[in-house]
Image (cartoon, rainbow, N blue to C red):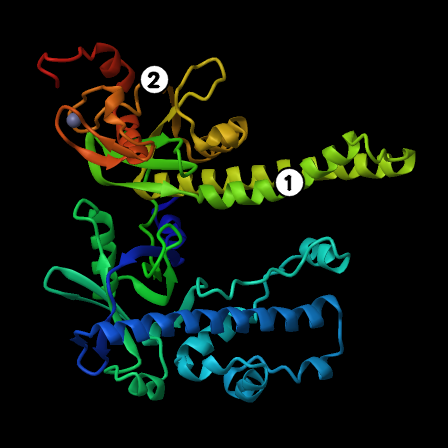
Amino acid sequence: MSEQEAAQEGTKLLAKTLTFGLGNPMGFKSKGSVLVELTEDQRKAIYNGLRDASTVVARIINLLNSREYIRQIMKVPEELVAQFKPNYSLVKGPLKRLGIEEAEQVAGSVLSQTFALGVKPDFQGEHGKGLLLKGERQIPLHRTDGTHPIPQRATETRLFQVEKNFYVAMQVFAETWAKKQELPSGWLAFPIKVKPRDKTMAGQLLKTIGGEWKLKNSRLMRNPRTGGNRWLGQIVVAFAPEPFKKMTRSVVMGIDLGVNVPACLHISENGKPLPWAMMVGRGRDMLNTRNLIRSEIVHIIKALKSKDSPLDGKARAIYRDKLRDLRKRERRVMKMASQTVAARIADTAKRHGAGTWQMEDLSPDIKTDQPWLARNWAPGMLLDAVRWQARQCGAELVMVNPAYTSQRCARCGHIDPQNRPKQTDFKCMACGHEDNADKNAARNLSVVGIEKLIADFKAPNGAVQ
Ligand SMILES: [Zn+2]
């Protein structure tokens, strides 16, 4: 590829979602960006208001989904559907008649953003629509229990820094309602929790504040892992990716097959490790998609094996056909997901010119204690996809014995099973270095000759280097 082509390749903007924990909300005056401390009572009103806002958002999206269901699946004529207008200001009345009174207290910008998202129904694709029409699938219902994310536009989202702390402010409530609750305004500001060791997040927030990365939209959501009033913030940013570079053998990318993510990447340039490591793919989404099909398969197998109500010959044949189709679909879904992950791995390699890829050997005869996601995810498929991508970009794929790559400290080289106190965390018993376990393993895998380093390691008490 010529340099010019490489430059053109790099001009398309990429989008990325940043997720972070939030501290207690503060009041906010958007004019001048002033933070205001709140009383316990004001905070209580806010948490109740947030629950209401979340419920309103979920109800509106459910409403819009039903509307699209009527139009696209039931094929009700357009002039009848048109009475349900996809625009908040036009349906203010109908919302009230439907009993969604709380919509009055939510900021108009939140409602507009909800409508903008809601008009894209959850049932995209002909296959999904077919299933809905046959009644084999239900329209997804969004939860109205106060856990639904509250979306906001970029224009009503502010990201800023006061001293060393980061904040995100959003206009969540209608001004009239905020006034009644004696809040400074309909805006809320949340301190962003950034772990001191997480240099990546701080860097990304600074790029967004500085305008290098463009803020697209944001949302507030209840943290699903903790009960009570713990909230998460998400912002979607767009940025110009690094242009593609010439592939160089001495730029080495380590690919770790993660525990929680399909893959984790780290790059060393001529032996110098880059500060960041990167997760690729969404493990939970991949497994969820697959499990949906799995549960249908299990259901059919049970029906075929059932002794209480044996299926007659014809029904059996239908069930067998269905089973075969589902298995095909499962493979297709898994293959597509593997290819997506591999494509992103290749993209990162091209942007850094990584001409050598070091990856764990996935052959079944290689023993590993790692319960990596790929083990549940057809390792052969992922390997095939990565191999294909490596060939396409002219990178050399080096298979590394995975033994101890997850137990070795990427900073000091100490190897100890106790370095892994928890599946997701790494903490070195020798030097105290802490990291995400997948990232630590990826850092090890980007070291040239890592197998020999591990084999030569002498534990412990000696001078560990
Ligand atoms: Zn260490």
Q: Residue at x 17, y 81 (%)?
A: 32
Left or right: residue 158 compared with residue 345: left
Q: Residue at x 73, y 53 (%)?
A: 136
* Mark 1 and mark 2 residues within 8 Å of each other at the beta carbon: no
The numbered mark, 1 or 2, whose residue comes first in the sequence reads 1
Tell me which amino acid carries mark 1. Ser
Tell me which amino acid carries mark 2. Ala
Work out whether residue 174 or residue 198 is closer to the camera in this orientation and state it: 174
- Gap between marks 1 and 2, in whole Å? 34 Å
Q: Quadrant of residue 191?
A: bottom left
Left or right: residue 101 compared with residue 230: right
- Residue 107, image x and y in percent? 39, 80
**Residue 403 badge:** 2
- Residue 71, image x and y in percent? 70, 72
Vertical order, 91 against 459 (above or below): below
- Residue 44, image x and y in percent? 30, 72
Q: Secondary structure at mark 1?
A: helix
Left or right: residue 408 compared with residue 364: left
Work out whether residue 212 or residue 126 is closer to the camera in this orientation and state it: 126
Q: Secondary structure at mark 2?
A: loop
Split into quadrants, the picture shows ligand 1 in the one at top left
Vertical order, 7 against 333 (above or below): below
Left or right: residue 273 compared with residue 406: left
Looking at the figure, which quarter contains the C terminus? top left
Q: Residue at x 17, y 74 (%)?
A: 35
**Residue 295 badge:** 1
- Residue 405, image x and y in percent? 30, 23
